[in-house]
Amino acid sequence: MKQQALGICDNCLSEIPRDEWYTSKGKPRLYCGIDCRNTGNSRAGAPIRSKKAKQRVARGEWQNPAKLNPPTPEEQARRSRLGRKREVSAGTWRNPALSDEAKEKLSRPRKHDPALHAVLEKLKQEQRLADLTPEEKELHRIYRRDLRQARRKEVNAWYRNWYRQQQASLSDEEREAQRARWREQNRRRRKARASE
């Protein structure tokens, strides 16, 4: 059930674009995006989760997580090794890399060239950028620059598409009024720059 007015997000109260006021099922859209939807669903389910937790406490089933002893990484590794040993001795263990899906994945070309891949692996292992050689730093710099440019292109394409959709919903008079406002803003900016 929608809480706010049509076109207003029930969570953050921001405006929803006019062409997205209704879902594909024809119902009023409750939230502006996936984050607000997840937050709203979580808040709606909070009383149910709380009630169930209280019932577990009343039945004596609840345990304080702070008093539990989770296994250490060494213990987890030991358990995993034991499981593999059992599978090997029973003859049921299979190399995961030999499955059809794994073979298909391993046959694909690498996402990065080997040198850049080695640099990214070093940085994953908590090495600092300062620890890299000059050649590795240059590789990383070029990679980050290309990544930024690709993201910028993606964002610009999204805004161009959004702008086209906005313009399509305007009448000729509204478009002309918008252009007049922009011309006036540009004139003021030029005047302010000239006076500096």
Image (cartoon, rainbow, N blue to C red):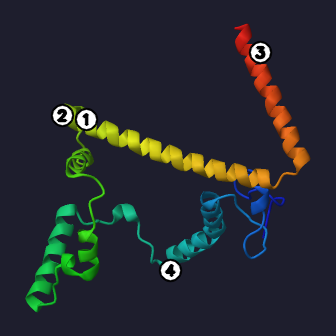
Q: Earlier in the sequence, mark 4 or mark 1?
A: 4
Q: Position of residue 48 (x, y in %)?
A: 62, 73
Q: Which residue is mark 2?
A: 133
Name the residue nearer the viewer: 17 or 75. 17
The three-letter code of the residue at mark 1 reads Lys
The three-letter code of the residue at mark 2 reads Thr
Disc 1 packing (10 Å; few <14; some 14–19; many ≥20): some
Between the residue at mark 2 and the residue at mark 4, the CA separation in whole angstroms equals 61 Å
Q: Secondary structure at mark 4?
A: helix
Q: Quadrant of residue 145?
A: top left
Name the residue nearer the viewer: 68 or 165. 165
Q: Which residue is mark 4?
A: 59
Q: Is residue 50 above or below residue 146?
A: below
Whether the residues at callouts 1 and 2 have beta carbons within 8 Å, the answer is yes
Disc 3 packing (10 Å; few <14; some 14–19; many ≥20): few
Q: Earlier in the sequence, mark 3 or mark 4?
A: 4
